[in-house]
Amino acid sequence: MKRFAFFASLLALLGALLLAASPAPAVAAEPPVIAIPVVQADPGATVDVAITVDTRGVGIRGYGLNLDFDPTRIEIESFTDGGFLGDCPGGAIYEGYVVIDNVAGTLKGASATFLGCPTKSVSTAPDSPAALGALKVKGKSGASNGQMNWVFAANTKLIDANAGNMLPPKITLTPNWLQIGTGQAVLRTFVPMIAK
């Protein structure tokens, strides 16, 4: 009987030690986010529109950005890389050829990626939002007041440390809108109706 109690106590102690030594289950990280904030542009005026990236701790080695917009209301004058990838010692950062079509309402080919960096394979961007890029946007003269929604077009992505494409749902895209002219930029919310 004493032997049984001794072995039962020993097994309980070993079980407690094993549980204490087991790593906690991994918590799924939130996916990285590419976002465009709400900005106001008066007709005829040019404004800067920031595009941010929050890596959420994921090693990123590049990005690709494509946008659709309403060409009857705005023109995109330029896209500039924000430099969140940092430098590439011993290699280069390849930037894609950006094509802005203000007739069709598209921006295509905005991209950057590490090429041949022997000492660095991912961005050291902070987890807080960093500058992915910036747009110079001009509100068209005579454009009606109101909201113009940005649309992230196909193949907007981040490229992870293994050169894998991270498309939604592996990343979150938050396009928001551009407020043309005066008016209240109001978030629209859906309120479900409850049947009585």
Image (cartoon, rainbow, N blue to C red):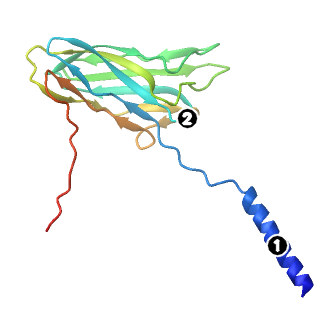
Tag 2: amino acid: Gly
- Closest to the observer, 79 or 38: 38
Placement of the C terminus among the 4 image quadrants = bottom left
Which mark is drawn over residue 57?
Answer: 2
CB under 8 Å between callouts 1 and 2?
A: no
- Closest to the observer, 19 or 70: 19
Near mark 1 (Cα within 10 A), the count class, few <14, some 14-19 or many ≥20, is few
- Using the rendered view, name the quadrant where residue 154 is placed: top left
Disc 1 on helix, strand or loop? helix
Please state which of the two labelled residues, at mark 1 or mark 2, is closer to the viewer: 1
- Closest to the observer, 58 or 37: 37
Q: Is residue 156 visible?
A: no
Tag 1 residue: 11
Q: Is residue 76 left or right of residue 172?
A: left
Location of residue 116 in the rendering, given as x and y in whole percent from the top left corner: 61, 19
Placement of the N terminus among the 4 image quadrants = bottom right
Residue situated furthest right in the rendering: 3
Residue at image location 11% in from the left, 13% down from the top: 141
Location of residue 173 in the rendering, given as x and y in whole percent from the top left corner: 36, 36
- Using the rendered view, name the quadrant where residue 92 is placed: top right
Location of residue 43 in the rendering, given as x and y in whole percent from the top left corner: 14, 15
Tag 1: amino acid: Leu
Which mark is drawn over residue 163?
Answer: none
The first of marks 1 and 2 along the sequence is 1
Q: Is residue 84 visible?
A: yes
Location of residue 77 in the rendering, given as x and y in whole percent from the top left corner: 27, 12
| Residue 161 sits above or below residue 102 on the image | below
| Residue 14 sits above or below residue 132 on the image | below
Residue at image location 52% in from the left, 21% down from the top: 85
Near mark 2 (Cα within 10 A), the count class, few <14, some 14-19 or many ≥20, is some
Residue at image location 50% in from the left, 16% down from the top: 94
- Closest to the observer, 126 or 120: 126
